[in-house]
Image (cartoon, coloured by chain):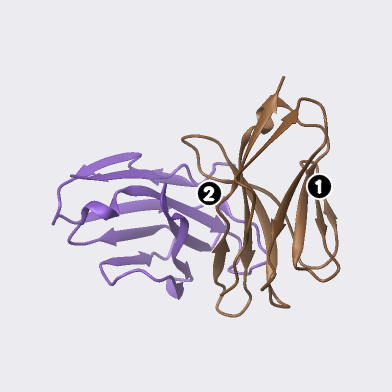
Amino acid sequence: KAGVTQTPRYLIKTRGQQVTLSCSPISGHRSVSWYQQTPGQGLQFLFEYFSETQRNKGNFPGRFSGRQFSNSRSEMNVSTLELGDSALYLCASSLVPSPGSPLHFGNGTRLTVT
Amino acid sequence: DAKTTQPNSMESNEEEPVHLPCNHSTISGTDYIHWYRQLPSQGPEYVIHGLTSNVNNRMASLAIAEDRKSSTLILHRATLRDAAVYYCILRRNTGNQFYFGTGTSLTVIP
């Protein structure tokens, strides 16, 4: 069974630009969540989607947004990029959005903002 | 807010058991305790999770204190492949929020 696939693996963008990251969950998994990982802040929750609906959102500004498609694939978008947005962005999928359901992570997209 | 506290680093000799502690004194009754580990340049990998009772799987065991304010991940025989950063995470039922610790970097000495 294929794992969680995130594309692209690496991205370099300039301040002020916008970026879209993609996540394909494990087949059959309907819940997708996104995380930001930085050396200073560690792992932080961005948002979670289930059945094309955002269920939860972390404490990030409105420049961070996402969506989920009918096939459970998800994208996240960051507009007006800032230097501090440089991070590893991780996507995880699970069968259902239950706290008792294990998360399966992709290997992330490394975003560098210059 | 619920929060988890873990030691920054630990060392273990190869083939010996490892006990990785996590404190979560503000845990609520419906919070699940999850453990993940992460190798460099990879996403976190699921290890184990539990709610109230101790849990075992092929990778590890999870011992949860009776008052649920702490838990311990037990690797029964550490191997070099177990060297990673281990994260203790609380997942809340209400609003399904996620609370991450800063992780414990485990070094396995051959």
Question: Where, quadrant-wise, is the N terminus of chain B in this rendering?
Answer: bottom right
Residue B49: x and y in percent read 72, 57
Q: CA distance from mark 1 to mark 2?
A: 19 Å
Answer with left or right where residue B53 lies relative to residue B21: right
Q: Residue at x 41, y 51 (%)?
A: A40
Answer with left or right where residue A62 lies relative to residue B95: left
Mark 1 Cα shell of 10 Å, populated few (<14), some (14-19), many (≥20): few
Q: Which residue is mark 2?
A: A105
Q: SS class of the residue under badge 1?
A: loop
Q: Is residue A37 above or below residue A33?
A: above
Q: Colour of chain B?
A: brown
Q: Residue at x 15, y 48 (%)?
A: A14
Residue B57's tag is 1
Residue A94: x and y in percent read 58, 59
Q: Residue at x 53, y 63 (%)?
A: A30
Q: Colour of chain A?
A: purple
Task: Report the front residue among A114 and A70.
Answer: A114
Please tell me in which quadrant of the rendered image residue B59 appears: top right
Q: Is residue B19 above or below residue B66?
A: above
Mark 2 Cα shell of 10 Å, populated few (<14), some (14-19), many (≥20): many
Residue A44: x and y in percent read 46, 60
